[in-house]
Structure formats: C-alpha cells, structure tokens
C-alpha cells in the first residue's frame, strides 16, 4: 500500500494541467460512483490527478491507482479498496478500469460493501457502462471528457479565461459575444493551428504531433475496440483498412457493399465495425432526421479535424474540415442530422445550419444560420464559425 501512496504523491505533485477543464465543475463529486469516459489521448489521467491535487493535495484520504499495475492481476481491487478504507481512505481514483477483467462486478462489490467510499474511475469511450453492465445500472453517474475545445485552446495560448456559451446564447447574442472576445484576441490567428493539432492535449508535448496521433488512433483500435469488444486480433487489419478508406473517401454516404468487398467481409460486419469506430471517437455517423443505427448512416466524417490531417493530409479539403469542426464541437450536447437541400446540418431537429468558407452568393435563407469561416464578426444569421468552438 505504501508504494501506491508514494506513486500517488509523486504524480499529484508533478501534475500541472495548463487548462482547467470545464467538466471539473459539471460533475457532482458527492456521488459515490462516478465514471469518466473519453477517447484515448484526451487527458483522463491528468483530469483525475488534477481533481486530487485541487481537493486533497497529498492527503492520504484520496488515492490514485492504475489498473495497468501488475499487482491487480493477483488481487481484486475491491479487496484493495477495503484496505484503503481501513487506513482512512475516502476517495479512490481508478484509472483504466477496463484493464481488469471483472471490473463491473468489482465496482458493484465496492459500492455495496463500502458505503462511505467514493470511487471515480476512467474508461474508454467504447464502454457502455449501463447498457452492457446491468450491475452498474442505477448506481453509476457517467460523464464524457472530450478533447480541447477551441475555447480551451485559445485560453491556453492567450492566457485568457473566456467562458463557454450555450448554442442558444451564441445564436441570440453572437455579435456581443464576438466583440468581447475580439477586444482581447483575434481568434482566427489561432484557428488553423487548432484544427490541425489542438484537439488532443498531447500537442503540449515535445513530440511530433501527427505521429503521436497516428499511434494513438492505432491504440484506439487495438485496445479500445479489439480488447473491449473482444474481437480476434486477426481482424485488426480489416478495421484499420476500413478506417483508412472512410478517411480517404471524405465525408459522404458510405458505400457499404464496396467497403465490404474491399475488406473481404459481410455488409453486417462492416456496419458493426463502423459502429465500433464511432464509439471509439474515430468517426462520426450522421443520419437523416429520425434514423439511427443499425440503419446505414447518411454521412460519415472523421471525429475531429486533427485526425484528418494525420491520416491523409494530402486530401484535406477546406469544406470538409470546416464541417468536421462544426460537427465535433456540436456533438457534445446536440443531436446532429443531415441538412435539407441547401444546408449542411439539422441541429436538434429544428435549426438548419450551412457551413461555408465565406458569405455565399445568391439567395440567403432567413431560416438558416450560416456559419462562416473567414469572418471575425457576424451579423444577423451570419455567425463566425470559430465562435461555435466556445460551446464547451
């Protein structure tokens, strides 16, 4: 146990999160069992350690453990939690919970046996905490940690503390909001670097970002999909090839028969693989209003713009990048569907958006909101695209 305390103290003392994530204030930390999901590379470990640093420092009532530790191959973490409780423990932070075989049962055991213990655990975005783990249904509160928003990225580089805004606030007050931001910084000076390498926090590391991202994407497939979904290793190359083909083809309606033929599998299997890639936050599936999986999506796009530049940089088209940025930032709190003729997307079933590099020529639809890239300050139903990066 002492070794874990020492590791915890070292990690907390050396944790320095340059941007305080908004999720920190959205979580009700009084809940006894909290699950924080997120795609690989978005900073879940740092998030846990930052919470420990803010609320406990090196106080031994809080302890961080990583289930990658070989120690837990011999001993269940429920027994470990009991010993921690006897030593005055109150909050146990468990990282990479899915690395332990019977993790859901162990969490349930902890919940039932130790009512005074609070547990916060991290897991992959592929995990379905409640649907696939009925033992946890009704007792776990689940949250999603996303990559950096443009707002967080901008705050980091300009040392500002711009707040987030709801979609309703942006639509109603975008001119006022944009002016308040433009009085301190010119967001478009930072926008291109963000869409190229600003979503994943490891852009702060002194390594080649694209190479690091490609390795991370491979790990999403090899671990988050194959391990959690229990898919045989021999199918790894098929899933990777499918992702590459979807990226190369660009946002659009997938030809399932062609994809099935290319990776030599059935249409049903291709659809399952596409769903796994979406769960792993490697792609986004966009349906027509009212449709959903297992139907074929109307469009498939990469999950975020950084992935586009990493996986196939020679075929990155501006319109695709802008639409992918908009999709990604809207996805957190809004339902996205394909737009009707002359629009890009339908948001929450009632608001049409058209994403454009610049103000379009010709007839303007007063019922459509135009999100424009090359615009600092909007007016009416013309809103700068960068401002939607302030949704979280």
Image: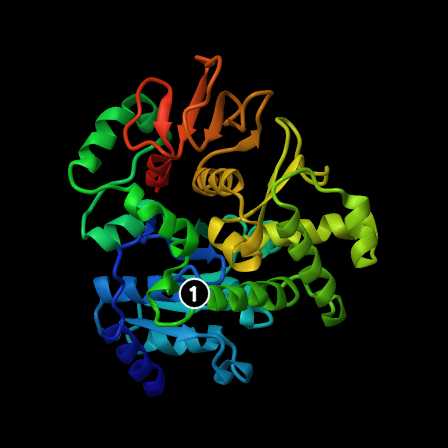
Q: How busy is the neighbourhood of tag 1: few (under 14 within 10 Å), some, or many (20 plus)?
A: some
Give the residue number, with chain letter if any, for mark 1: 209
Give coordinates of residue 40: x percent, y percent: 49, 62
Q: Secondary structure under badge 1?
A: helix
Give coordinates of residue 30: x percent, y percent: 32, 53
Task: Choose between 24 and 274: the one closer to the eye.
Answer: 274
Q: Can residue 370 be seen in this view?
A: yes
Q: Residue at x 42, y 59 (%)?
A: 42
Placement of 365 over or under 339, stated as above or below? above
- Quadrant of the drawing holding the C terminus: top left
Q: Which residue is drawn at 80% across and 55% down?
A: 262
Q: Residue at x 38, y 34 (%)?
A: 385
State the residue lying farthest toward the left.
183
Placement of 9 over or under 124, stated as above or below? below
- Quadrant of the drawing holding the N terminus: bottom left
Task: Choose between 83 and 13: the one closer to the eye.
Answer: 13
Q: In this view, does 141 lie to the left or right of 349?
A: left
Placement of 247 over or under 237, stated as above or below? above
Give coordinates of residue 21: x percent, y percent: 31, 53
Q: In this view, does 262 lie to the left or right of 385?
A: right
- Specify how the rendered protein is coloured: rainbow
Task: Choose between 123 and 313: the one closer to the eye.
Answer: 313
Q: In this view, does 89 lie to the left or right of 324?
A: left
Q: Can residue 26 be seen in this view?
A: no
Task: Choose between 316 and 157: the one closer to the eye.
Answer: 316
């Amino acid at each position: 146990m002492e070794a874990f305390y020492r590791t915890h103290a070292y990690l907390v003392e050396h944790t320095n999160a340059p941007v305080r994530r908004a999720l920190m204030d959205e979580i009700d930390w009084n809940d006894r069992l909290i699950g924080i999901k997120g795609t690989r590379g978005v900073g879940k470990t740092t998030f846990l350690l930052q919470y420990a640093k803010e609320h406990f420092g090196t106080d031994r009532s809080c302890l961080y453990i990583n289930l990658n530790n070989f120690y837990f191959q011999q001993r269940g973490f429920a027994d470990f939690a009991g010993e921690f409780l006897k030593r005055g423990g109150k909050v146990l932070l468990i990282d990479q919970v899915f690395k332990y075989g019977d993790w859901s049962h162990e969490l349930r055991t902890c919940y039932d046996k130790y009512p005074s213990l609070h547990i916060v655990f991290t897991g992959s975005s592929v995990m379905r905490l409640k649907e696939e783990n009925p033992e946890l249904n009704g007792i776990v509160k689940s949250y999603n940690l996303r990559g950096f928003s443009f707002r967080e990225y901008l705050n980091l580089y300009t040392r500002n503390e711009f707040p987030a805004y709801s979609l309703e606030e942006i639509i109603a007050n975008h001119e006022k909001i944009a002016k308040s931001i433009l009085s301190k910084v010119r967001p478009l000076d930072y926008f291109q670097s963000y869409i190229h390498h600003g979503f994943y926090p490891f852009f702060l590391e002194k390594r080649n970002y694209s190479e690091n991202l490609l390795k991370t994407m491979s790990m999403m497939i090899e671990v988050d999909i194959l391990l959690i979904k229990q898919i045989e290793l021999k199918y790894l190359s098929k899933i990777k090839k499918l992702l590459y083909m979807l990226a190369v083809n660009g946002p659009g309606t997938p030809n399932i028969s062609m994809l099935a033929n290319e990776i030599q599998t059935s249409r049903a299997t291709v659809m399952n693989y596409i769903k796994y890639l979406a769960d792993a936050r490697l792609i986004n599936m966009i349906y027509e209003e009212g449709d959903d999986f297992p139907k074929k999506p109307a469009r498939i796009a990469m999950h975020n713009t950084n992935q586009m530049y990493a996986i196939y940089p020679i075929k990155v088209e501006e319109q695709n990048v802008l639409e992918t940025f908009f999709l990604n930032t809207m996805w957190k709190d809004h339902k996205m569907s394909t737009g009707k003729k002359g629009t890009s997307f339908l948001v929450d079933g009632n608001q049409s958006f058209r994403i454009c590099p610049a103000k379009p020529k010709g007839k303007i639809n007063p019922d459509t909101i135009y999100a424009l890239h090359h615009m600092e300050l909007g007016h009416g139903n013309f809103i700068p695209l960068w401002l939607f990066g302030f949704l979280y």
